[in-house]
Image (cartoon, grey):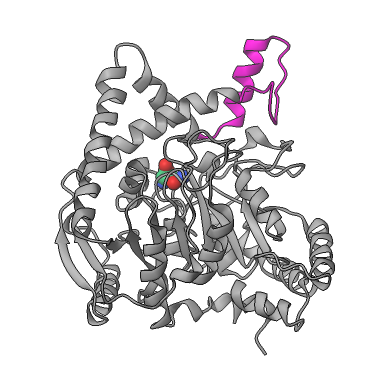
């Protein structure tokens, strides 16, 4: 018999509807899985087991009364950067230890309204700054495929819990790759929606013009189910777009014959792990065999994306993080005097990477340097966006690797921040352009570590990603494999 934690969200919903299982059983199975594996994987910062069982019980009662909400009774985990009413929300930072928001983020609220059972809050790089979750102010999270390796970041707790079957799906957030990179490193499906597709209300801001929340799951269909609920206009977020949300499940047709796929030549540069390049090229070849048309594309400003992103993201972060002063939220080191209290709280509360970025951002925004750095970066951002607009005049979707390598070992990139920043080379332009991007599993390297295929589409064309990804997934079995840890 399949273990309850091995079910996909879609399978579990069928079984719940048929009364083969109850949400209480399903939720208890996940709580047991957390008890069994989280001491090793270390992904949860907060487990809300009691609340989860209460919610599961309520879901079963509601279902018995005829309720059929889209995620009724499904146990999910939330990244600790999404505000959860009455439940500690740390953003992976000591400065927010003990902070309990008085409201739910819109994306979380919509998942609650759809019937989810919330299992708890998961680890991340502090304020979502990083690619490996090694910048967490709490602990390291391990990759369930290999405990000596990072789970990716910044949504590394999210990828680890879903890969280790400690949640059926999780929310992540992506400012420069933080959904797609951990999804790739842990063999999952992850989608960063178009900027403005999912409300940022209650998503604690890192780079306000870049951040988006999205789902991380084991299948494309499950991701479609979660995004369906999370997406849509929210008057509480002025950057949320008032455009209709298509029925994503209805777009999973298996049809790729008419699809035009662009292969950006700049995304296959030197430094790619050969097995990653091969797996990605094999996946693209599969699409061609299935009837899609391949077109070589150029994104000429790609080489500027990393520098542009780090100026813009750090500038926005330096402004956004000014509010953590020991007075309004979370931890406080009281020194009597207000300025000394600020200094002591921020000095001890923020980790090294966060401080580095506040300094970079403050510098880039300072009088006399603003035009040379921030102004210039914004101009280049427009060029990067236009590269994509031109590409999408010719093709429906772009494909590449998500990260040039598979999951690296702890410590491999922590000595040199620039080396860590390079992990984002293939994901970061997408956030600058505001378009949607997806990661799906497309193979394993010879160390048995997952490899991710990245699919990109024009703004508000998430359905194209779902359709293309689902067709590939149906013809492969990568998503059915399990880490040895769970055998
Ligand atoms: N790794 C990138 C950074 O450190 C992106 C992080 C993210 O998407 N939140 O900024």
Ligand 1, seen in the image, is in the quarter at top left
Judge whether 235 appears above or below 485 on screen: above
* Horizontal side of residue 171 vs 48, given as left or right: left
Choose between 186 and 177: the one closer to the eye: 177
- The quadrant in which residue 310 appears is top left
Can the viewer see residue 147?
no
* Residue in the picture at 48% in, 70% down: 250
Q: Is 203 placed above or below 364 here?
A: below
Could you say which is closer to the camera, residue 27 or residue 228? Answer: 228
Q: Nearer the viewer, residue 441 or 419?
A: 441
Q: Residue furthest top?
A: 337
Image: magenta residue range = 324-352
Would you say residue 321 sits in the magenta stretch? Answer: no
Residue 316 position within the rendered picture, expressed as x and y whole percent measured from the top left: 44, 29
**Image check: 172 left or right of 40?**
left
Q: Residue at x 61, y 26 (%)?
A: 324
Q: Quadrant of the C terminus?
A: bottom right
Look at the image and tell me in which quarter the N terminus lies.
bottom right
Q: Does the stretch in magenta take in 344?
A: yes
Residue 342 at x, y percent in the picture: 62, 18
The vertical placement of 265 against 450, above or below, is: above
Q: Position of residue 114 (x, y in %)?
A: 68, 59
Most foreground residue, 220 or 49? 220
Q: Residue furthest bottom?
A: 1
Residue 371 visible somewhere in the drawing: yes
Count of numbered labels shown in the rendering:
0
Q: Quadrant of residue 226?
A: bottom right
- To which quarter of the image does residue 408 belong? bottom left
Q: Is residue 14 above or below residue 420?
A: below
Q: Position of residue 466 (x, y in %)?
A: 42, 66
52 with respect to 171 (left or right): right
């Amino acid at each position: 018999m399949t273990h309850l934690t091995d079910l996909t969200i879609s399978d579990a919903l069928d079984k719940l509807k048929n009364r083969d299982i109850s949400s209480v059983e399903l939720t208890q199975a996940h709580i047991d899985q957390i008890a069994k594996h989280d001491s090793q994987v270390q992904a949860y910062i907060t487990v809300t087991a009691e609340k989860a069982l209460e919610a599961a019980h309520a879901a079963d009662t509601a279902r018995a009364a005829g309720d059929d909400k889209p995620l009724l009774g499904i146990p999910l985990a939330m990244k600790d950067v999404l505000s959860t009413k009455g439940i500690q929300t740390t953003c992976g930072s000591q400065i927010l230890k003990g902070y309990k928001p008085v409201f739910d983020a819109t994306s979380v609220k919509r998942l609650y309204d759809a019937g989810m059972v919330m299992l708890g809050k998961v680890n991340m790089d502090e304020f979502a700054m990083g690619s490996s979750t090694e910048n967490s102010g709490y602990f390291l999270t391990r990759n369930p495929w290999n405990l000596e390796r990072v789970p990716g970041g910044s949504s590394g707790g999210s990828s680890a819990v879903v890969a280790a079957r400690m949640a059926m799906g999780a929310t992540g957030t992506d400012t420069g790759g933080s959904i797609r990179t951990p999804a790739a490193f842990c063999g999952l499906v992850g989608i960063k929606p178009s900027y403005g597709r999912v409300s940022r209300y209650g998503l604690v801001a890192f780079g306000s013009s870049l951040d988006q929340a999205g789902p991380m799951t084991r299948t494309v269909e499950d991701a479609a189910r979660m995004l369906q609920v999370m997406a849509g206009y929210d008057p509480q977020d002025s950057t949320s777009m008032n455009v209709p949300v298509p029925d994503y499940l209805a777009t999973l047709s298996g049809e790729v014959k008419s699809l035009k796929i662009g292969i950006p030549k700049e995304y296959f540069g030197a430094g790619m792990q050969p097995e990653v390049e091969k797996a990605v090229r094999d996946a693209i070849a599969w699409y061609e065999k299935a009837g899609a048309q391949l077109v070589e594309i150029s994104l000429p400003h790609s080489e500027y994306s990393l520098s542009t992103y780090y100026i813009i993201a750090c500038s926005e972060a330096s402004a956004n993080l000014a509010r953590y002063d020991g007075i309004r939220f979370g931890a406080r080191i009281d020194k009597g005097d207000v300025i000394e209290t600020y200094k002591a709280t921020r000095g001890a509360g923020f980790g090294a990477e966060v401080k580095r970025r506040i300094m970079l951002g403050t510098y880039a925004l300072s009088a006399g340097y603003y035009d040379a750095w921030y102004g210039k970066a914004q101009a280049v951002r427009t060029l990067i966006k236009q590269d994509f607009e031109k590409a999408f005049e010719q093709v429906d979707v772009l494909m590449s690797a998500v990260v040039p390598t598979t999951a690296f070992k702890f410590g491999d990139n922590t000595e040199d921040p620039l080396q860590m920043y390079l992990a984002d080379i293939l994901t970061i332009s997408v956030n600058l352009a505001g378009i949607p991007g997806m990661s799906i599993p497309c193979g394993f390297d010879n160390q048995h570590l997952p490899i991710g295929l990245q699919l990109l589409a024009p703004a508000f064309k998430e359905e194209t990603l779902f359709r293309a990804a689902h067709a590939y997934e149906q013809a492969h079995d990568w998503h059915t494999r399990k880490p040895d840890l769970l055998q």
